[in-house]
Every structure is written in structure tokens, then in C-alpha cells.
Amino acid sequence: MRVSMAKEHVHSVVKIHLQSWAPYEISVKLGRQYLEAFYNNIVNDSNSFGYVFVHDNDIIAYAVGFNNYLAFGQNFQKQHLFSLIYYCLVSFLKMKLNIFDMLNIIADNQKLILLEHPEYHLGALALHKKYMRTVIGRRAVLESISAVIDHLRHAGYPSCWGCCDERNIPMQKILVNRFGFNNKGTHRQKGRNTVMFEKYFTTVDV
Ligand SMILES: CC(C)(COP(=O)(O)OP(=O)(O)OC[C@H]1O[C@@H](n2cnc3c(N)ncnc32)[C@H](O)[C@@H]1OP(=O)(O)O)[C@@H](O)C(=O)NCCC(=O)NCCS
């Protein structure tokens, strides 16, 4: 069953994020406290929203979306500036984040130049590790993604974008093969590359 993401879901969502996302992802390196702050803002800020998929009383997948990605980012930085600097420094001192990661964080928004509409975004999503490559897992994650895309489409926006590390083949296949996103190019960063995708809503999609 799919439901809107709420504050009481954040703990489970963070747990899935930490277990399922690749260890090279900056969000994983920044750690639990950073993720708690991020997903709490997702459910509290009117520029963002999310859906979770519940199976046997457990959250097994989720996906989040943004009505205005840039406004969300500004609010998040304003509200958590000192904590964000602290999480970066702690992760750096623990040698989880390296200097390349730090530079990539600072320049992150440069990737948006490849997009036509950077506001409307299919953002973070994941499937619980235990359910990967299972029928119910595939249904859970695809329904969560569909819910975000439908939410943005029904809001009347012209498109939505997604992105992932170029090593993340399953995510690229899902965006292109399952949901018809267009590859908008690769944003080259220090020590990693991010592939950018955008899907345009047409009357055929409605
Ligand atoms: C992305 C994610 C939701 C995909 O779920 P999954 O159950 O692993 O996905 P699937 O096994 O259905 O794989 C999706 C597709 O990629 C293919 N695939 C998987 N691993 C692959 C690999 N190493 N090489 C090539 N293809 C691969 C699958 O065969 C499938 O293709 P198909 O649709 O043609 O059958 C899941 O891996 C996840 O939660 N990852 C961590 C979070 C994450 O990376 N989020 C995105 C960050 S932007």
C-alpha cells in the first residue's frame, strides 16, 4: 500500500537510505543526522513531498519529489547551515568525505545547467535491501516513483528530472526503460560523474 510520506516515516526512510544507497554516495557519507534533517525537511517544506510503500506493516520503499528544488535547497541550507558544516567536517575528519566530495558539494548545482526545468524533480528514492530483485520490491519502488511523477504531472508542470551516479545502472535503466526519461548528458565532477535525465509530460502521459 502506498501512502504519503509523513514525519513518523522518516526514521524508517533514513534506515533504508543508509542500507540501500551505495557507500560512495555523498549523502551516505554525511550520515544519519544529515539524512534525518533532510527527510524531515522533505515532509515539512511545501516545496517537497514524498511517498512510502508499506508491506506487512513495514516501509519497504520510498521516493521523494520537489515542486521547487531550488527553493527547497535554499530553505534547507538556511535552516541547517551550521549543522551542515558540522556534518561535513565530522565526515571529513572521519575520512568518509574526501576533498573531492567537499568540492562536489559546493559545486553541486552546476549539474542543473543540463536541464530545461530544474525546479521539478524526482529526487531521492530507494528500495529496502531485503526486497531487491523481488516481485513485491519491484512493485513497491515502481509505485513509489510513479506516485511522485503523477504528483508533478497533475500539478501541471511541464517535466520532471532525475539523476544518478553513472555507476548506478539499475537506476538508469528504471528511469529510461520504465519511465521514459531522456538522457540529458553527464555532469563531470571530481572523482565521480552524475548522469542527468529529464522527462517531458505530454497529453499522451495523462
Ligand atoms: C535503484 C533501485 C530502486 C532499483 O531496484 P532493484 O530491485 O535493485 O532494481 P532491479 O533489480 O529491478 O533492476 C532494474 C534494472 O536494472 C537491471 N540491472 C540491475 N543491476 C544491473 C547491473 N549491474 N548491470 C546491468 N543491469 C542491471 C535489472 O536487470 C533491471 O532491468 P530490467 O528492468 O530490464 O529487468 C535499488 O537498487 C535501490 O534502492 N538502490 C539504492 C538507492 C538508489 O540508488 N537510489 C537512486 C539514487 S539517485
Image (cartoon, rainbow, N blue to C red):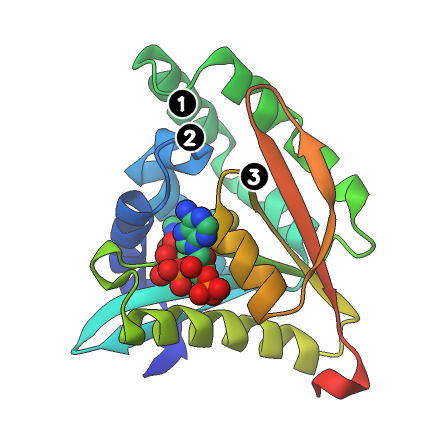
Quadrant position of ligand 1: bottom left
Residues at marks 2 and 1 touching, judged by CB atoms closer than 8 Å: yes
User: From this viewpoint, is residue 66 visible?
Assistant: no
Between residues 143 and 134, which one lies in front from this camera angle? 134
Between residues 104 and 33, which one lies in front from this camera angle? 104
Kind of residue at disc 3: Glu
Residues at marks 2 and 3 touching, judged by CB atoms closer than 8 Å: no
Residue drawn at x 27%, y 69% is 134
Quarter of image, res 9: bottom left
Q: Where does residue 195 sit, x and y in percent of width and height?
A: 64, 43
Mark found first going from the N terminus, 3 or 1: 1
Q: Quarter of the image containing the C terminus?
A: bottom right
Disc 2 within 8 angstroms of ligand 1 (CB): no
Residue drawn at x 68%, y 63% is 181
* Residue at mark 2 to residue at mark 3: CA–CA distance: 29 Å
* Residue at mark 2 to residue at mark 1: CA–CA distance: 5 Å
Residue with the mark numbered 2: 83
* Residue at mark 3 to residue at mark 1: CA–CA distance: 28 Å
Name of the residue lying farthest toward the right: 116
How many callouts does the rendering have? 3
Q: Is residue 95 left or right of residue 101?
A: left
Q: Where does residue 164 sit, x and y in percent of width and height?
A: 55, 45
* Mark 2 crowdedness (10 Å alpha carbons): few <14, some 14-19, many ≥20: some
Kind of residue at disc 1: Tyr
Residue with the mark numbered 1: 86
Residue with the mark numbered 3: 166
Q: In this view, does 141 lie to the left or right of 165?
A: left
Residue drawn at x 54%, y 58% is 173
Residue 30 vs 38, above or below: the answer is above
Q: Is residue 202 left or right of residue 172?
A: right
Kind of residue at disc 2: Ser
